[in-house]
Amino acid sequence: MKWRIEELNAEVTRKKYEEEVDRQLTNNREINNIEIEWNKIKRGLIDSAGKTLGGSDRERRKEWIDDECKNAIKEKTNARLKWIRARQE
């Protein structure tokens, strides 16, 4: 998820985000271990951002290596191996 952090420039949104983070972090203040505490903080920040900033799903990357590229790589590898073998003879 990519957060729309530019929304934090608005005072109202920033204040709302701060309040939401405070609310999230004051819930379950029971101290367990560091991993559990970190996960609580992380989850609180993510939930707060989702509620106040919103976001957009990132566009999936397009596969840049296609069959043509794979074939070219194979040809290059085979040519290199052939060259190495020729030098050894």
Image: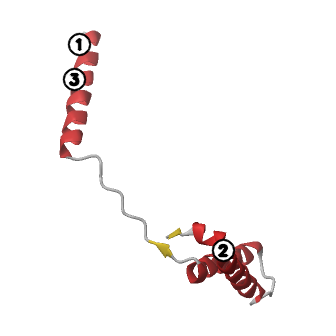
The numbered dot on residue 79 is 3
Tell me the amino acid under the disc marked 2.
Answer: Lys
Front: mark 2 or 3: 2
Q: Quadrant of residue 24?
A: bottom right
Tell me the amino acid under the disc marked 1.
Answer: Ala
Q: Residue at position x 30%, y 48% from top? A: 64
Out of 45 and 18, give the one closest to the viewer.
18
- The answer for how far apart the CA atoms under marks 2 and 3 are is 51 Å
Q: Residues within 10 Å of mark 1 (few under 14, many from 20)?
A: few
- The answer for how far apart the CA atoms under marks 3 and 1 are is 11 Å
Along the horizontal axis of the image, is 34 left or right of 83? Answer: right
Front: mark 1 or 2: 2
As helix, strand or loop, the secondary structure at mark 2 comes to: helix
Q: Which residue is under mark 2?
A: 42
* Relative vertical location of residue 21 with respect to residue 59 in this rendering, above or below: below
As helix, strand or loop, the secondary structure at mark 3 comes to: helix
- The answer for how far apart the CA atoms under marks 1 and 2 are is 58 Å
The numbered dot on residue 14 is none
Q: Residues within 10 Å of mark 2 (few under 14, many from 20)?
A: few
Front: mark 3 or 1: 3
Please provide percent x and percent y for residue 26.
Answer: 78, 87
The numbered dot on residue 86 is 1
